[in-house]
Image (spheres, helix red, strand yellow):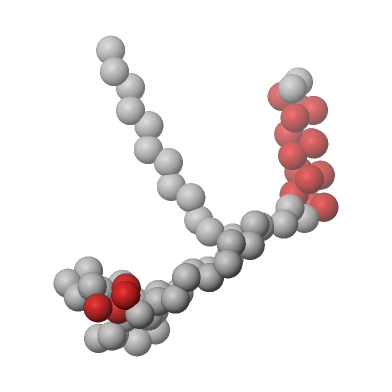
């Protein structure tokens, strides 16, 4: 038996990509010119808030981890 799982994630901070033929940050897969004009940015890791830490601690306690 083979089991396949697919997972989707959502970024904590919205990422906007500008395309040369559209406005509003829409993706244009037919034209790769817009991808070349996006300058790379420095990596900034997401910070875990105290509320998120409390939620994790609560979940771990309930699950006995």
Residue at image point 80% right, 36% down: 57
Check the image and report above or below for 20 versus 26. below
Q: Is residue 46 positioned above or below 2 on the image?
A: below
Viewer-proximal residue among 31 and 41 = 41
25 left or right of 31? right
Could you tell whether 7 is left or right of 33 in the image?
right
Task: Identify which residue, 36 or 5, lies in the foreground.
Answer: 36
Q: How many marks?
A: 0
Residue closest to the eye, 8 or 28: 28
Asked whether, in this view, residue 45 is left or right of residue 15, the answer is right
Residue 50 % position (x, y): 82, 52
Horizontal and vertical percent for residue 25?
39, 79
| Image quadrant where one finds the N terminus | top left
To which quarter of the image does residue 45 belong? bottom right
Position above or below: 23 against 47: below
Residue 54, located in which quarter of the rendered image? top right
- Residue extending farthest to the top is 1
Residue drawn at the location 37% of the way across and 32% of the way down = 5
Position of the C terminus, as image quadrant, is: top right
Residue in the image at 30% along x and 78% along y: 34
Residue at the extreme left of the image, as rendered: 30
Q: In this picture, is 28 found above or below 61?
A: below
Please report the residue visible at 22 percent of the width from the left and 69 percent of the height from the top.
29
């Amino acid at each position: 038996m083979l089991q396949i799982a697919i997972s989707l994630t959502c970024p904590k901070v919205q990422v906007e990509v500008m395309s040369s033929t559209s406005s509003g940050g829409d993706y244009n897969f037919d034209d790769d010119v817009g991808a070349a004009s996006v300058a790379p940015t420095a990596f900034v890791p997401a910070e875990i808030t105290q509320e998120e830490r409390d939620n994790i601690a609560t979940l771990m306690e309930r699950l006995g981890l």
